[in-house]
Image (spheres, grey):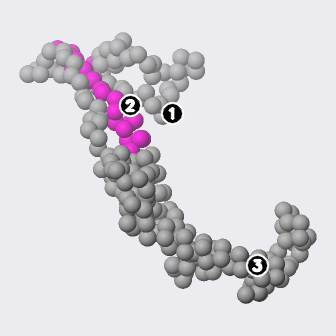
């Protein structure tokens, strides 16, 4: 016997009222592959949940990393000549203030803005030089190279595909499907998976059909 509680969407019993059902009145579609998930078994997607979370976090981390490291920066090596050491800072600050496009001081309040600004990743470097390195020059520091460095992403994605047990081609990640027309013909492992699910569904549908026939007077 099974005890269920009423809900608002049912017309057979009042909300909150308990009802006892016989075994033949209930059909269970259960995946009993793991005893730790009684009474209805474990979802087909359960093994892929953790990997999917890891993949999502890794994709976000990759995006943040690329945004932060992508901009190219310039290194301004400014020849300070015979300027005394105690005046180098003021001289460099004057040069920087003339060349910078973004003001450091908030012109409305007159206060220094300490809040993080994405544009700060594009800030240039200003280095005073003298002696053997004298002579003003401008060099470029390259940004992050986009050499398809997504090995970690591909590893987690392949791991998630293995957990789902579905061929990659049918999820849009691989176009080399081949001449085979069905999932079952493409991957034997997936064929076994869907066969196991079909057995579960067919057995419960058969039970429903038998109960229906019995209530109609067919008792053979």
The residue under the point 23% across, 24% down is 140
Residue pushed farthest right?
Answer: 14
Q: State the image coordinates of residue 205 (x, y, percent, origin top left).
A: 66, 73
- Locate residue 36, reporting x and y percent: 55, 81
Region in magenta: 62-88
Eyeballing the image, is 106 above or below 177? Answer: above
For mark 3, what is the residue?
Answer: 213
Residue at numbered disc 1: 115
State the separation of the CA atoms marked 1 and 2: 13 Å
Q: Is residue 206 above or below residue 189?
A: below
Q: Is residue 128 left or right of residue 170?
A: left
Picture coordinates of residue 108, whole percent (x, y): 58, 18
How far apart marks 1 and 3 lie (CA) works out to 73 Å
Does 137 sit above or below residue 146? above
Label 1 vs label 3, nearer the camera: 3
State which tag comes first along the sequence, 1 or 2.
1
Q: Position of residue 206 (x, y in %)?
A: 65, 77
């Amino acid at each position: 016997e099974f005890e269920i509680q009423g809900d608002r969407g049912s017309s057979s019993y009042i909300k909150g009222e308990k009802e006892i059902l016989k075994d033949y009145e209930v059909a269970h579609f259960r995946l009993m592959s793991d005893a730790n998930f009684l009474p209805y078994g474990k979802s087909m997607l359960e093994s892929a949940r953790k990997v999917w979370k890891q993949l999502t976090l890794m994709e976000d981390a990759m995006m943040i990393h690329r945004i932060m490291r992508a901009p190219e920066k310039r290194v301004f090596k400014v020849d300070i000549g015979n300027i005394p050491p105690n005046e180098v800072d003021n001289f460099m600050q004057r040069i920087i203030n003339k060349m910078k496009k973004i003001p450091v001081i908030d012109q409305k309040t007159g206060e220094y803005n300490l809040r993080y600004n994405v544009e700060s990743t594009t800030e240039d470097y200003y280095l005073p030089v003298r002696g053997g390195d004298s002579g003003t020059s401008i060099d470029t520091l390259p940004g992050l190279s986009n050499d398809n460095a997504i090995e970690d992403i591909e590893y987690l994605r392949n791991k998630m595909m293995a957990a789902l047990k579905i061929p990659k081609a049918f999820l849009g990640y691989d176009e080399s499907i081949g001449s085979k027309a069905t999932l079952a013909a493409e991957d034997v492992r997936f064929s076994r998976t869907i066969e196991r699910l079909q057995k579960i569904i067919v057995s419960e549908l058969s039970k429903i059909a038998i109960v229906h026939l019995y209530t109609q007077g067919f008792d053979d």
